[in-house]
Image (tube, rainbow, N blue to C red):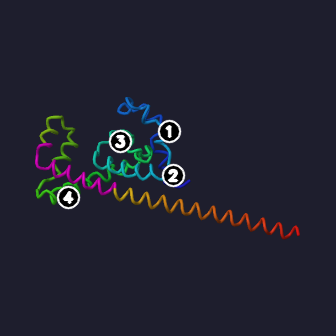
């Protein structure tokens, strides 16, 4: 079993864990629909794109997985893939994502905001009043716009990579199947020749 497979089994949400998630509980009967848990050529790339978008744009642990599961319903995305892709935004990548989002937002909106206020609010466990004050500051629009652009770009790239990966995987399966069928025909004709 590969390291990626072990990580997947350890971190991917199960149907049972989502059933007991308080954010998902009101719509659990829809989220647990079997078609949303199948790995198909359409649902997997959608799950990758959705998970990357939600994971990067929300940046709120716990809500990311529930958000990906709920948004998977209307777009018919694979829920385990969408939920697993949210893990790409984690404590190691969040500071870089925040810095990049402020930089991109400043560049696109022509502002000169700073992300240090956002990080200070997180470290000091700020209340609602402080968060509302930050939301109306100059940094918030730049960061939110930058996060939106980064999450859209990551979703698009992830979608295209998933489609490419799926095609390569299916191509290899077809090649292996043709090879097996060809070998069966060869061994069958050799047996007929030996019998004559």
Q: Residue at x 42, y 31 (%)?
A: 20
- First of labels 2, 4 by sequence position: 2
Are the two marked residues, 2 and 3, in contact with CB atoms closer than 8 angstroms? no
> Which numbered disc covers residue 104?
4
Q: Residue at x 26, y 53 (%)?
A: 95
Are the two marked residues, 2 and 4, in contact with CB atoms closer than 8 angstroms? no
Please name whichever residue, 123 or 88, is drawn nearer the observer in this view of the structure: 88
The alpha-carbon separation of the residues under discs 3 and 4 comes to 26 Å
Camera-near label (3 vs 4) is: 3
Question: Looking at the image, is 193 positioned above or below residue 45?
Answer: below
Where in the figure is residue 82, as x and y percent of width and height? 40, 47
Are the two marked residues, 1 and 4, in contact with CB atoms closer than 8 angstroms? no
Where in the figure is residue 89, as x and y percent of width and height? 33, 50
Residue ID for mark 3: 71
The alpha-carbon separation of the residues under discs 3 and 1 comes to 16 Å
* Numbered disc 3: secondary structure: helix
Report the side of 172 relative to 105 (left or right).
right
Q: Which residues are magenta?
A: 134-155
Instruction: For label 3, count other residues whose C-alpha is less than 10 Å away and answer few (under 14), some (14-19) or many (20+).
Output: some
């Amino acid at each position: 079993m590969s390291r990626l497979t072990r990580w997947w089994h350890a971190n991917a949400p199960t149907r049972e864990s989502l059933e007991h998630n308080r954010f998902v509980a009101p719509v659990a009967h829809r989220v647990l629909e079997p078609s949303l848990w199948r790995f198909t050529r359409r649902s997997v790339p959608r799950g990758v794109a959705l998970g990357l978008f939600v994971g990067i744009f929300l940046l709120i642990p716990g809500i990311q997985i529930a958000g990906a599961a709920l948004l998977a319903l209307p777009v018919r995305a694979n829920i385990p893939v969408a939920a697993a892709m949210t893990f790409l935004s984690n404590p190691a990548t969040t500071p870089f994502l925040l810095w990049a989002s402020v930089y991109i937002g400043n560049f696109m909106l022509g502002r000169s905001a700073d992300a240090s206020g956002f990080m200070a609010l997180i470290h000091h466990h700020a209340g609602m009043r402080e968060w509302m004050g930050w939301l109306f500051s100059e940094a918030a629009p730049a960061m939110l716009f930058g996060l939106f652009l980064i999450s859209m770009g990551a979703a698009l790239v992830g979608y295209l990579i998933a489609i490419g990966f799926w095609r390569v995987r299916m191509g290899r399966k077809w090649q292996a199947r043709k090879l097996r069928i060809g070998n069966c025909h060869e061994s069958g004709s050799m047996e007929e020749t030996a019998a004559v």
